[in-house]
Image (cartoon, helix red, strand yellow):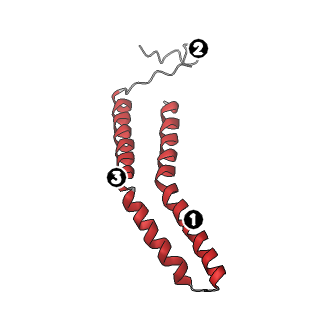
Amino acid sequence: MPIDIIEITKSAVEISLWLVLPPLLVSMLIGLFVSIFQAVTQIQDQSLQFVPKLIIVFFVLFLMFQFNYTKLETFTLDNFKLISTITQNKVVKPEYSSNVLAPSLDVQ
């Protein structure tokens, strides 16, 4: 059972990285290019930094929508299947139980 929780957590972190990294990296690169452009031209306008990032990140999110949706759908359905298999096995026999520790709790 703890292995299932570890796998779910690992999958959740992986999915989060797949969803967040592309827009974040694009935003970082656009910010770098705009900063270099501002330094070269000596234009110090805050909207020049914000507007291209906003437009391009929305464009990247739009392009990645199908991929993100598929990843999230697969992750959610796998978790629902895992929940149903865990709840069907209501009695869990721990491997460490013995008659010495709990002689009156014999689980057959």
Q: Which of 105 and 62 is in front in this view?
A: 62
Upstream in sequence: badge 2 or badge 3: 3
Upstream in sequence: badge 1 or badge 3: 1
Q: Name the residue located 55 percent from the left edge and 60 percent from the top edge.
A: 25
Q: In this rendering, which labeled residue sits more in front, label 1 or label 3?
A: 1
Residue on which the image places disc 3: 66
The kind of residue on which mark 3 rests is Gln
The kind of residue on which mark 1 rests is Leu
Q: In this rendering, which labeled residue sits more in front, label 2 or label 3?
A: 3
Circle number at residue 29: 1
Image coordinates for residue 53, horizontal then vertical, percent: 50, 71
Q: Which of 23 and 90 is in front in this view?
A: 23
Q: Name the residue located 52 percent from the left edge and 15 percent from the top edge.
A: 103
Q: Which of 90 and 67 is in front in this view?
A: 67
Q: Is mark 1 on a helix, strand or loop?
A: helix
Q: Nearer the viewer, residue 32 or 76?
A: 32
Q: Name the residue located 36 percent from the left edge and 44 percent from the top edge.
A: 76
Task: Identify the image quadrant of residue 34.
Answer: bottom right
Circle number at residue 96: none
Q: What element carries label 2?
A: loop
Image coordinates for residue 21, horizontal then vertical, percent: 52, 55
Q: In this rendering, which labeled residue sits more in front, label 1 or label 2?
A: 1
User: Label 1 to label 3, Cα distance in Å?
Assistant: 23 Å
The kind of residue on which mark 2 rests is Val
Upstream in sequence: badge 1 or badge 2: 1
Residue on which the image places disc 2: 100
- Residue 93 versus residue 43 in the image, above or below: above
Q: In this view, does 39 lie to the left or right of 6?
A: right
Q: Name the residue located 37 percent from the left edge and 28 percent from the top edge.
A: 90
CB under 8 Å between callouts 1 and 2? no
